[in-house]
Image (cartoon, coloured by chain):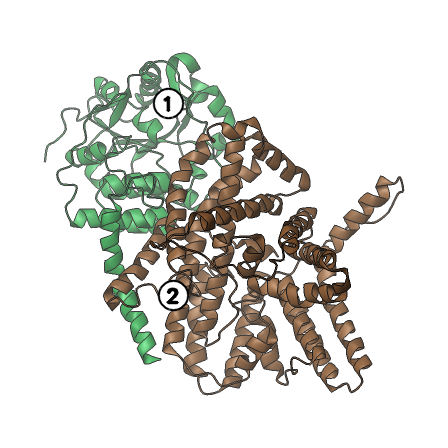
Chain colours: A brown, B green
Amino acid sequence: MLFNSITFAIFLPIVFFLYWIVFQHNSRWQNMLLLMASYVFYAWVNWKILSLLIVTTLVFYGLGIAIYNAVDTKKKNRLNTLGVLFGLGILLYFKYANFFITAFKDVVEHIGLQTNLHTFSIIVPVGISFYTFRLLSYLIDINRGNQKPAQDIVAFSAYVAFFPSILAGPIDRPKLLLPQLQTKRVFDYNLAVDGCKQILWGLFKKAVIADNCAVVTNFVFDNSANLSGSTLLLGAVFFSFQMYADFSGYSDMAIGIAKLLGFKITQNFNYPLFAQNIADFWRRWHISLTSWLTDYVFMPLNIKWRDWGKKGMILAIIIDFIICGLWHGANWTFVLWGFYHGLLFIPIILSGKMFKKTKIETSKRGLPTLKTLGSMIFTFFLVTFGLIFFNSESISSAWTFVSGIFSSSLFTIPSRKVLANSLTFCVLICVLMFIEWSGRNNQYAIEFLGLRWKKCFRWAVYMFIIFAIFMFVKTKETPFIYFQF
Amino acid sequence: MKRFIKSIFTFALLLIPTCFVYLFFWGFVPDKIKSNLNYGLGSGGYSYSRLQEVKNFKEVDILFLGSSRSYRGFDTRIFNQYGFYSFNLGSSSQTPLQTKVLLNRYLDRLNPKLIIYEVSPEIFYVDGVESALDIISNDKNDRESIDMALTINHIKVYNTLCYAIERDLLHLNVDFHQPLQDENDTYISGGYVERRQLDFSDNKDMADVEFVSNEKQTDAFHEIIRLFKRQGIDYLLVYTPVTDDYYENFPDNENFDDKMKTFGTYYNFNKILNLDDSLHFYDWDHLNQAGVEIFNRNLIEKIKPTQISCEKSTSGLPIQK
């Protein structure tokens, strides 16, 4: 079930009604409803994969209690390792088995040997990367003593399968969401209204910006071998906006839906288009994944290799980003994308600015200073370059794309077909950038938009956003890019 | 909670009229930006003029239906020469879904003795959006339009229909007048559009059609045939001539012929006539005037022996309101 589908538009009000009106006074029943709704939501994609989610949840629930009750540290660590191996094993099997088999086969055949290895026919369960990471953090945090295990299996299962975020995040930590599921919830008018606004803004970004940019980017990436450098560059730039609007749009909708149900979940984006260097970018982009990898991959490695100084940190960040790349999918393009981002960190680490937060400097008119703007544009193009690998089917097609950009045809007029569509998209992107810039200090751009205005004017703005969605939405429902991960 | 539900309902209630206000102003935005609003009043195929004129016609001998190949392929002047008082109710990319709407609106009034329905494999594949927008923009909108929009279920059709209804209600089209001649075409009374261009220009892309049968179109086509039979109207199904390349573009012309024959009298003029692509067409699928002359006279030879005779014809000037 997609957030931008008619089915979901029917599903959500039903859940909302039952949750706040029928089961209002009993949080356990509310959790039960949430769990059932989450399972229905998840099974809607493919009911066959629901059993895996249930089994994995039960195993981690049991392991969490076992780790907590174990007196001996060694036993705790053994159980923790078992759980981590189980979680990663499931992820590796369903998502990466064929990738590693093919890679192994290629290596073996390259050195002249024959193998009888065959790839499996496996359905990759949607959202597996998200809920596995959620479960792993639960177990590791219990082992580290940062988290108590959930006693209520319904609340725990609802945390794992929480429908607003199961398919594409945010990857909520147990310490944030579990306590909310274990306490009584009272309907908060302001939170619900805030949720509606955030859903609206997310839908705008998805339906108006992302899906319209996709018209150009799909064409450009599908025909990269035959297009001029200027067209490819335009396509790559559009893809950056599409990617941001698509994923942040999804995240806004997920957070908004959670707010409607009385939950506050992790903020996943903080205006990454205004990042001034790559470290700043990763503090603003897919925050829940970045912080997860920082806590469970980068920091342990960095501590382990601290004696190596900056070299150890560089190695830790490169490994961290290769894992980040692999997390996105079983393809060498993702590995290369991760490695590329790891490399981009080297100058930042060497200059000692790794953990330094960057402030956006503005002029008296409220616009970014020239230096800030230059840094933003430079960072944007660094990210855009990486996304070419991210969105290509193979390294060779990514290479074709990149070499196409850096050819003499870069200085020609872009393809007529792309240009014909570009005017509308440029206008839409300018609107997006203006609103995002104006609201950059808030959780989402329209959070405080017009709060001081009269209600009728504020509502008129929200209605215009809805109107714009009708004017630009594609008739066919388009899945979110991050659903594939 | 009550306050929230009250707010949501109030918002939803106000949303509809507010969107209509926005829609009105959105109409002034340049066409290139109006992604999901394609209101083409007086658009290329002279649908506006034709649908205005049809209201002055009644009791015709022959009614032509179909796409641009109909209104650019059946010259009512030639049929008039043979004593057939006729009207061409073709419209751009007309598919069975739109044919059904137009028949429900005008069939009783026109009461034709014979219907010549231009058919091609294309009409069973396309979604009908383009033609729906054409009809919505250029004709009055009624229950038929709403039914058609619901059947097609496309956001562009919904938006354009809302905008068209708004314009109808505000009488914004009252002063509209479509010139009957432009750079290339002349609108001929009776619905035909004459293209002055004689040479073939292939600068238009070949139809990019996805060959997936559209059940809605098939159902609508069956309904149309049932309607003809129910009303006892004779009809001919005609596959008008197209260029060889265009004809070959469709994968199963033979099956299409067989299928059409099961519905009634059917002529595939791509097999009957041997026209020259460069002499008789002005683009991939439209005849030039020379081609139209040959095609129409050949068609008239075929319909002469039918029950429509010159004696019965009511040929003459259109009846004015």
Badge 1: residue crowd in 10 Å (few <14, some 14–19, many ≥20): many
Badge 2: residue crowd in 10 Å (few <14, some 14–19, many ≥20): some
Question: Disc 2 is attached to a residue of which chain?
Answer: A
Q: Position of residue A156 (x, y in %)?
A: 61, 79
| Element at label 1 | strand
Quadrant position of residue B207: top left
Name the residue carrying label 2: A447
Query: Of residues A110 and A142, which is closer to you in this image?
Result: A142
Q: Which mark is residue B286?
A: 1
Q: Position of residue A28 (x, y in %)?
A: 53, 85
Q: Position of residue A219 (x, y in %)?
A: 52, 38
| Residue B213 visible to an observer of this rendering | no
A51 in relation to B73, above or below: below
Q: Position of residue A269 (x, y in %)?
A: 51, 61
**Separation of marks 1 and 2 at Cα, in angstroms:** 55 Å
| Residue A371 visible to an observer of this rendering | yes
B217 in relation to B199, above or below: below
